[in-house]
Image: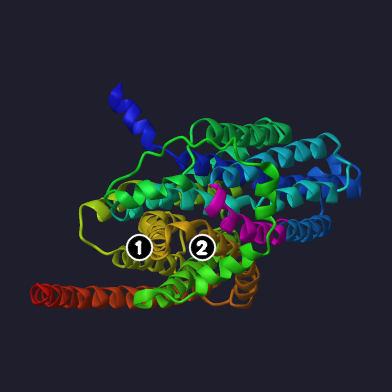
Amino acid sequence: MANVMACLRLVTVEPVMFLYMLGSFLQYTSVQQLIYAKTCIQEYNSSDICKNLTSSQEEYVQTQTSHWLIYLNLVQMVPSVIAALFLGSWSDTVGRKFSMILPCLASCIYAAILIVSVVYIYSPIPFIFIGTFLLGCSGAYITITFAVFSYIADITGIKTRTKRVGILESMTFIGSTVGLLCSGVMLEHEGFIAVFAFYLSLNFASALYILVWLDESVHSREVLDSLSHGETIQIPQVDTGKRRIHTLCSELCKLENIKKTLCVCFKKRENFDRMHLILLAMTLLLFQLVGIGETDVTVLYTKRNPLHWSPELLGYYLALNSFMKGLCLLTVMPLLTSKTSLHDTTIAMIGTVFRMAGYVLIAFSTTTWMMFIVPILMCMAGIPAAAVRSLISKIVNADEQGTLFSFMAACESIVGFLASFVFNSVYPATSHILTGGFVYLLMAVILVIALVLLFWVGDSKRKLNAYSALVEPANSDTGASEDCRDV
């Protein structure tokens, strides 16, 4: 029993990430279909007509739905980025728990608005934007991302951090897998209200878990600094009741938080760490760029000749792809970090090579069985981002984790939004090359840049370590002789 409780104590923010990603993928695909249904019913005033649309009617509904989705993404992304820049620096001072709870509570409100929008199907579509805007003001995915990764950075040492970050990153893929599988089944058999009620319950459970189970991590830094870097620290319970709410709010709203964010990212650091930080940030954004591009283009690529996939088959493929990445992060990455002496940059490079190989295979795939080999080949595609996040967290100080992760998450969100426009423009323009597969070769080429940046950082760090190993003994000898002279 004691061993079980000890294992449970090692579980911290992983369930938070899993529940949030499960809910996000569950609701996003359902919201897309809700807007499609509302657009059709409000235009033609008949659910029967919407079940049997003509080609021109279907084109109109799809076009309008596409426009609404663009507006929906903008309404959420802009306030999310702004909120994250304030919350990141703020969390370094007051703690991570509030930053995690806020998006969960905002998601509950958003879910309630979605349910009302379903009940009153003729309510205007912009009514949904109220919930989207409130979710954006909480920071949404950006806030959850920087908060959970900062939490892990707070409670782990250098030796165990890459493994723990990998496990946390796997929750993104496993949560998305379950969300993709559940959304279609629930929507078909239970309807929109059941889906959004489940979404609400997931976020409420996550908020309750954060309040009851998690201890604050920011105040454990003094303990962390005094212990071995290889150990995971158990965090003492901190009394937060003495904090005054108006003081916390005033600290949150300070414009200095944005200034601090920029300073943390670009200030001068020892041993070329500022350069390493910038290069690693660029690498992470390149992973995000091709990742979003892959998601968007794959839907179109698999629907055309010669594959002609059904929505059900596409769903199985996307779910398998996410599951394999999550499984690899849970199994392979801990082995690479604990059983080998490979540097984090080397681990990231290995995963990047596998990802590139997967893109090349997709470009030349002409049959379904070839496509279903891709998730197996790309199972290590989630490792590079996790390794880079770990590297970044090791460069900055303990009181800069939230600030840096919030800035990176905000940049990832912006890059992801731009990636949709870029690859959705490149794909139709090059669809005649390899029946659309050319865009995947372009993704592989972009990853070559990431590979070069990783090699550059790894080589630089190895040279610095070698130099330090040579200099330290010399300094030690000099110090000893000086002490003798003083005597």
User: Residue 194: where, in percent of width, then height?
Assistant: 69, 31
Q: How far apart in space, not on screen, are marks 1 and 2 (Cα)?
A: 24 Å
Q: Nearer the viewer, residue 190 or 167?
A: 167
Tell me where the magenta segment starts and ends, as one range.
76-95
Label 1 crowd bin: few (<14), some (14–19), many (20+), radius 10 Å: many
Q: Nearer the viewer, residue 147 or 242?
A: 242
Q: Is residue 101 above or below residue 272?
A: above
Q: Which mark is residue 351?
A: 1
User: Residue 372: where, in percent of width, then height?
Assistant: 43, 54
Q: Is residue 11 above or below residue 382?
A: above
- The residue under the point 51% across, 63% down is 404
- The residue under the point 38% across, 31% down is 8
> Would you say 356 lies left or right of 1 here?
right
Is 85 within the magenta? yes
Q: Which mark is residue 157?
A: none
Q: Which of the image's four quarters has the C terminus? A: bottom left
Which amino acid, by three-letter code, is at mark 2?
Answer: Leu
User: Which secondary structure, mark 1?
Assistant: helix
- The residue under the point 82% across, 53% down is 54
Instruction: Identify the image quadrant of residue 7.
Output: top left
Q: Nearer the viewer, residue 1 or 295?
A: 1
> Would you say 449 lies left or right of 482 here?
right
User: Residue 232: where, in percent of width, then height?
Assistant: 33, 44
User: Residue 107: where, in percent of width, then height?
Assistant: 67, 42
Label 2 crowd bin: few (<14), some (14–19), many (20+), radius 10 Å: many
Q: Residue farthest to the top?
A: 1
Most common secondary structure along the magenta stretch = helix
Which amino acid, by three-letter code, is at mark 1?
Answer: Gly
Q: Is residue 145 visible?
A: no
Mark 1 or mark 2, whichever is nearer to me: 2
Give the image's coloring scheme: rainbow
Is 443 within the magenta? no
